[in-house]
Image: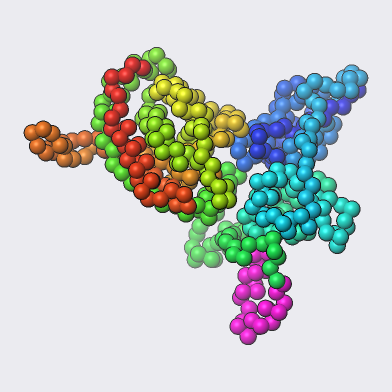
């Protein structure tokens, strides 16, 4: 008999851990090679892990909802034979980690640590048994940086992960408890102000002076408690994992980027008439419908080439302008959640190519078949709020991007048309589009100019092109 470890797979460049959401097989079950045995989830995408070999599951090493580092064994399968190694089942080699002492962190800000240290081993202070080291994943490091937690403070958190590792759940629980204690202190009577000042330790040199406090989740946990709180019958709906992630990302984006939104109207009559004329022929040839979104993506790509600062990101006091254009497109899922697959190198496709790639991504997104790389690397995002009837929207920036474009519903309206014979009233197809942008690096003039350039490309769409 030989025993083979089932390894937590690497689900993308930036993925360092995944959550086990459901075991499809149990200890004692016989499985075939490539048969799915467990469902896992990351903050990017859900997936299934297949059995690397045929055999019997003799040991499951993690429970459902456990967070597991990439490359760690999660189960053991016993196989027939004496082979010590089975192709495809070998342990994933760990990349070298960098050691950072608490003393070293005094000379570099937490922001720099978050970008420079992808996987860090922090040596605790002598008061924390100096012979023991802790591993911090990039996710934990990012959360610590966002909440102003110093490296020394981070090293003091008791971890529940493998080997005492601090997991995402551990640091979020620590932050929640810390904020609760702060609220209790702030709620003390004014007469105890002086006492509180004496008892309060001086802020660490690693911590920013100003912190943004996160809203606290309600303490109540049952429908009865909520009914008492709100004075009537209520329905309590627990957020699923994806909705919690969306909520977290939206709040973080608003805290990161000062949002400004500009609006413009576009006359898309030419596009509407052209699409009506060729849509049946296109469907017969390609097997899917031609929507307006690929046309808007093409116009956005042209505008980004004219104004590349909107195809950028911000790191500290550095502006990183991307020389490639990866367009993220917001897609509504059947369960009501949202995902943003990315068209890589969108500037290298013609209109038909954009339509094909977009249709493939949307189809796989709605059937849960996206890969981690399908939703990574976006440099600019477009969301079509008009799909659900909205005439306009103020979208939230998809971090770390600096702008997001929203296209509204196309409506027939009476408008003034300028002709050689003079102005006249006509019925035109009008669309309101909006651009939300990061005011740290994009001023109103640039934002409005980019949006007007997008409108120009939309209104001057080539209706003579061959598809």
Q: Is residue 49 above or below residue 193?
A: above
Q: Which span of residues is magenta-colored?
A: 178-201
Residue 64 in view: no
Q: In x, y percent, where is residue 177?
A: 68, 63
The type of colouring in the image is: rainbow
Q: Position of residue 328 (x, y in %)?
A: 49, 35
Write down the quadrant of residue 51 in the picture.
top right
Q: Quadrant of residue 375?
A: top right
All told, the count of numbered labels is 0
- Position of the C terminus, as image quadrant, is top left
Residue shown at the point (69%, 55%) measured from the top left: 108
In this view, which residue lies farthest toward the left?
421
Using the image as rendered, state which of residue 51 and residue 420 is in the foreground. Answer: 420
In the foreground, 221 or 334: 334
Residue 180 lies in the magenta-colored region = yes
Residue 295 lies in the magenta-colored region: no
Instruction: Write the residue at 25% across / 31% down.
Output: 269
């Amino acid at each position: 008999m030989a025993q083979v470890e089932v390894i937590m797979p690497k689900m993308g460049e930036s993925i360092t851990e995944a959550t086990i959401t459901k075991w499809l097989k149990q200890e004692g079950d016989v499985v075939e090679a490539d048969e799915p045995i467990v469902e896992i989830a990351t903050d990017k995408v859900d997936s299934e892990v297949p059995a690397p070999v045929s055999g019997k599951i003799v040991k499951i090493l993690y429970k459902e909802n456990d967070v597991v580092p990439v490359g760690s064994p999660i189960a053991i399968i016993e196989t027939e034979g004496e082979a010590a190694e089975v192709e495809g089942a070998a342990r994933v080699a760990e990349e070298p980690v960098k050691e950072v002492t608490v003393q070293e962190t005094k000379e570099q800000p937490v922001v720099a640590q978050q970008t420079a240290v992808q996987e860090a081993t922090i040596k605790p202070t002598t008061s924390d048994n100096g012979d023991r080291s802790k591993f911090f994943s990039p996710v934990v490091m990012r959360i610590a940086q966002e909440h102003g937690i110093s490296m020394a403070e981070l090293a003091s958190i008791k971890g529940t992960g493998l080997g005492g590792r601090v997991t995402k759940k551990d640091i979020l629980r620590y932050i929640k408890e810390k904020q609760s204690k702060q609220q209790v202190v702030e709620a003390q009577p004014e007469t105890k102000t002086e006492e509180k000042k004496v008892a309060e330790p001086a802020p660490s040199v690693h911590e920013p002076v100003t912190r943004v406090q996160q809203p606290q989740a309600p303490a109540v946990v049952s429908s009865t408690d909520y009914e008492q709180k709100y004075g009537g019958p209520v329905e309590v709906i627990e957020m699923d994992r994806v909705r919690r992630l969306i909520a977290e990302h939206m709040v973080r984006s608003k805290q990161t980027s000062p949002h400004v939104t500009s609006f413009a109207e576009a006359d898309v009559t030419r596009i509407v008439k052209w699409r009506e004329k060729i849509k049946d022929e296109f469907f017969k040839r390609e097997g899917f419908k031609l929507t307006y979104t690929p046309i808007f993506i093409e116009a956005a790509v042209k505008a980004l080439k004219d104004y590349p600062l909107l195809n950028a990101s911000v790191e500290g006091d550095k502006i990183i302008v991307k020389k490639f254009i990866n367009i993220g497109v917001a897609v509504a899922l059947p369960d009501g959640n949202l995902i943003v697959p990315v068209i890589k190198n969108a500037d290298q496709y013609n209109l038909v190519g954009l339509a094909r790639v977009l249709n493939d991504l949307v189809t796989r997104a709605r059937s849960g078949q996206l890969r981690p790389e399908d939703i990574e690397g976006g440099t600019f995002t477009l969301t079509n709020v008009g799909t659900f009837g909205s005439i306009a929207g103020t979208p939230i920036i998809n971090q770390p991007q600096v702008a997001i474009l929203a296209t509204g519903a196309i409506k027939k309206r009476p408008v003034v048309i300028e002709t050689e014979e003079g102005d006249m009233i006509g019925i035109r197809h009008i669309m309101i589009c909006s651009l939300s942008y990061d005011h740290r690096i994009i001023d109103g003039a640039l934002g409005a100019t980019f949006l007007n350039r997008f409108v120009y490309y939309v209104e001057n769409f080539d209706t003579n092109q061959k598809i």
